[in-house]
Image: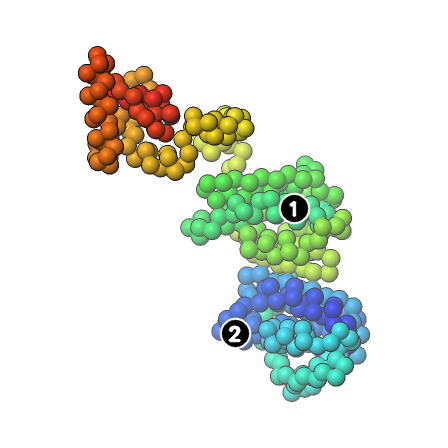
C-alpha cells in the first residue's frame, strides 16, 4: 500500500474517525484506525462495536491496499509533521513508513483482517436536510437525554420523520425537550427510530453551520448519518419511548410573571428579606396559622428568645392581646406579627 496526500486532509480524517476508537480493548485492532486506499480515495475508519465512523477524501493512490495503525500513535505522528505532502507506504510485513519533508517515521501496523467490518445499512428509508438544521436540533435536545441505563431507550433521542417535518424528542424523567424542523426530501415514506445520545453528540460535532445537506438513513438494526464525506453508523435503541403527546403532570398549565425591577427595589428598601436573612429566620417559621401568620418554632437562639419574651411581656402589660410584633426580616415577610 502506498499513497500521498495533504497533511491537513489526513489529519482531519484521523481526528474525526478517532472519536469512535476504543481507548482500551481486548482486541488490539479496535484501538486502531483502518486505512483503505482504493479508486483514488483514502478512507479512514474507526469502530468500537457500538459506534462506527468512516471518513474519506481524495488522495494520490499509488498502490491500493489496507492496513490498521494504532490511532493514538498515528495521530501523534501526523500532528508533529510539517504542513506538506505526506508520503505513506507499507510493505508485506506491515512495516509502515511515513515521510513528510525532513521528518521520517517507521511504525509497525496490524493486518486489516483483524479489524471488524462496519455494518451495512439498508437505504429503504432516507431523509435529507441541512447540516445546520440537524446540528441545532441535536444541540437543542441532547441536554435532556437520560443517563440512567435502567431505561435504555431513554438514553437516546426519538426521531419521527414524516408529514414534512422532522420531530426530535429527548426525556430524562425530569425534563422533556422537543424540536420540530422541516426537511428537504424523504424517501420510503414516514419512519421513526431512537438513536443513542452518545452517537448524536458525535454527529453534532461533525455537522457544520452551513446549508450543505446531511442524510439520515434507517436500516433494520442500524442508523446511518451521512455528513459530506463522513459516515456515522450506530445501533438503534429498542423499546417503548415515552408518549410525549399524552398530557402528564410535567406539563406546565399556569405561569406566574412577576416584575423583577419592583422586587429588587423592595429588597433595597428592606421590605423583602435578603437570602441570608431568609436562611437565618427560615428554620423558625412553621406552617401558617389563621390569618396567614406564622408560628415561632421553639429552640431558637437564646438572645432571640429573650427578645421575643421581652416584647411579649411588654405588649401584654400595655393591654395587648395574644400577638406581638416580630422585628427583622421574618416580620417583613408575614406582616410584622407572630401569634404565641
Mark 2, Cα crowd under 10 Å, few <14 / some 14-19 / many 20+, is few
Residue drawn at 30 percent across, 35 percent down: 283
Q: Which mark is residue 136?
A: 1
Residue drawn at 65 percent across, 77 percent down: 77
Give x and y (percent) for residue 70: 60, 76
Question: Of callouts 2 and 1, which one flags the residue occurring earlier in the amino acid sequence?
Answer: 2
Give x and y (percent) for residue 190: 65, 41
Residue drawn at 52 percent across, 36 percent down: 244
Q: How is the image coloured?
A: rainbow
- Name the quadrant of the C terminus: top left
Please report contact status of discs 2 and 1: CB closer than 8 Å, yes or no.
no
Per the image, the residue denoted by label 2 is 27
Residue drawn at 66 percent across, 85 percent down: 106
For the question of whether residue 122 can be seen, the reply is no
Closer-to-camera residue (259/329): 329
Instruction: Name the element at disc 2.
Output: loop
Q: How far apart in space, not on screen, are marks 2 and 1 (Cα)?
A: 36 Å
Mark 1, Cα crowd under 10 Å, few <14 / some 14-19 / many 20+, is some
Quadrant in the rendering for residue 133: top right
Amino acid at each position: 500500500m502506498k499513497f500521498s496526500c495533504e497533511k491537513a486532509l489526513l489529519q482531519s480524517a484521523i481526528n474525526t474517525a478517532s472519536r469512535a476508537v476504543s481507548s482500551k480493548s481486548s482486541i488490539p485492532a479496535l484501538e486502531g484506525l483502518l486505512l483503505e486506499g482504493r479508486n483514488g480515495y483514502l478512507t479512514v475508519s474507526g469502530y468500537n462495536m457500538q459506534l462506527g465512523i468512516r471518513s474519506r477524501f481524495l488522495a494520490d493512490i499509488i498502490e491500493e491496499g489496507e492496513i490498521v495503525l494504532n490511532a493514538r500513535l498515528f495521530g501523534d505522528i501526523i500532528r508533529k509533521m510539517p504542513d506538506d505532502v505526506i508520503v505513506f507506504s507499507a510493505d508485506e510485513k506491515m512495516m509502515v513508513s511515513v515521510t513528510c519533508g525532513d521528518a521520517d517515521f517507521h511504525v509497525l501496523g496490524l493486518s486489516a483482517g483483524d479489524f471488524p467490518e462496519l455494518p451495512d445499512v439498508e437505504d429503504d428509508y432516507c431523509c435529507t436536510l441541512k447540516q445546520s438544521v440537524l446540528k441545532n436540533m441535536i444541540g437543542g435536545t441532547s441536554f435532556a437525554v437520560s443517563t440512567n441505563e435502567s431505561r435504555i431507550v431513554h438514553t437516546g433521542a426519538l426521531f419521527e420523520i414524516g408529514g414534512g417535518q422532522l420531530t426530535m424528542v429527548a426525556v430524562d424523567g425530569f425534563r422533556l425537550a422537543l424540536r420540530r424542523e422541516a426537511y428537504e426530501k424523504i424517501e420510503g415514506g414516514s419512519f421513526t427510530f431512537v438513536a443513542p445520545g452518545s452517537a448524536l453528540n458525535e454527529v453534532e460535532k461533525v455537522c457544520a453551520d452551513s446549508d450543505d445537506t446531511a442524510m439520515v438513513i434507517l436500516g433494520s438494526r442500524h442508523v446511518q448519518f451521512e455528513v459530506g464525506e463522513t459516515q456515522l453508523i450506530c445501533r438503534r435503541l429498542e423499546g417503548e419511548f415515552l408518549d410525549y403527546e399524552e398530557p402528564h403532570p410535567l406539563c406546565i398549565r399556569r405561569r406566574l410573571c412577576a416584575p423583577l425591577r419592583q422586587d429588587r427595589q423592595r429588597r433595597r428598601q428592606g421590605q423583602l428579606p435578603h437570602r441570608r436573612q431568609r436562611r437565618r429566620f427560615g428554620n423558625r417559621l412553621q406552617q401558617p396559622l389563621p390569618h396567614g401568620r406564622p408560628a415561632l418554632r421553639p429552640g431558637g437562639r437564646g438572645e432571640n428568645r429573650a427578645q421575643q419574651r421581652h416584647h411579649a411581656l411588654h405588649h401584654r402589660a400595655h393591654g395587648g392581646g395574644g400577638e406581638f410584633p416580630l422585628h427583622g426580616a421574618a416580620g417583613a415577610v408575614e406582616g410584622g406579627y407572630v401569634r404565641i
